[in-house]
Image (cartoon, rainbow, N blue to C red):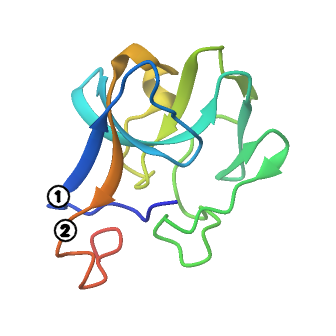
Amino acid sequence: MSGALCDGDLVLGLQVRHTTSISRGDIVVLWSDVGIAIKRVIAVGGDTVEMKNRRVELNGQFLVEPYLCDADGTNEGHATQSDVPFTVPERTFYVLGDNRDISRDSRTFGPVERALMLQKVVFNLSRNRISGCACGK
């Protein structure tokens, strides 16, 4: 699972086609209500997502998210918006930004259809990764 991306990072992505596998934890480039966005796939069709005490619960298990700004990956201090379980429709994906406080993602624009996914990020080419950039720090 890839770490969080930072402003200015340069990434290599593969064009999403019908045969491209998209899995939980993948980072994807997609069309959203605000244009092109980069988000992390949290859930796939049939999964149930719930936000509890500012943490993500997936299919009854809390996610450990080491790519978030918090060192322990618990998502403490990050904004989430719903304590109501949501079942992701088949053939769609629930995506969240790693910077949850300011991210516009499936919490605001809903699940994403595969047709709106442009690329799957496969490699971060950035020099920032060498310097240890994490969440803009």
- Residue underneath mark 2: 126
Residue 81 visible to the viewer: no
- Looking at this view, name the residue that lies furthest to the bottom: 131
Query: Distance between the Cα atoms at labels 2 and 1?
Result: 5 Å
Residue 13 position, x and y percent, is 27, 44
Q: Residue at the spot x=55%, y=26% of the render?
A: 93
- Residue underneath mark 1: 10
Q: Quadrant of residue 77?
A: bottom right
In the drawing, does residue 37 fall left or right of residue 96? left
Name which of mark 2 and mark 1 comes first in the sequence: 1
Q: Residues within 10 Å of mark 1 (few under 14, many from 20)?
A: some
Q: Amino acid at mark 2?
A: Ser
Quadrant including the C terminus: bottom left
**Is 49 placed above or below 78 here?**
above
Q: Quadrant of residue 71?
A: bottom right
Residue 130 position, x and y percent, is 25, 82
Q: Residues within 10 Å of mark 2 (few under 14, many from 20)?
A: some
Q: Amino acid at mark 1?
A: Leu
Q: Which of the pair 24/106 is nearer the observer?
A: 24
In the drawing, does residue 38 fall left or right of residue 3? left
In the drawing, does residue 72 fall left or right of residue 70? right
Residue 90 visible to the viewer: yes
Q: Which of the pair 80/35 is nearer the observer?
A: 35
Which structural element holds mark 2? loop
Q: Which mark is residue 137?
A: none
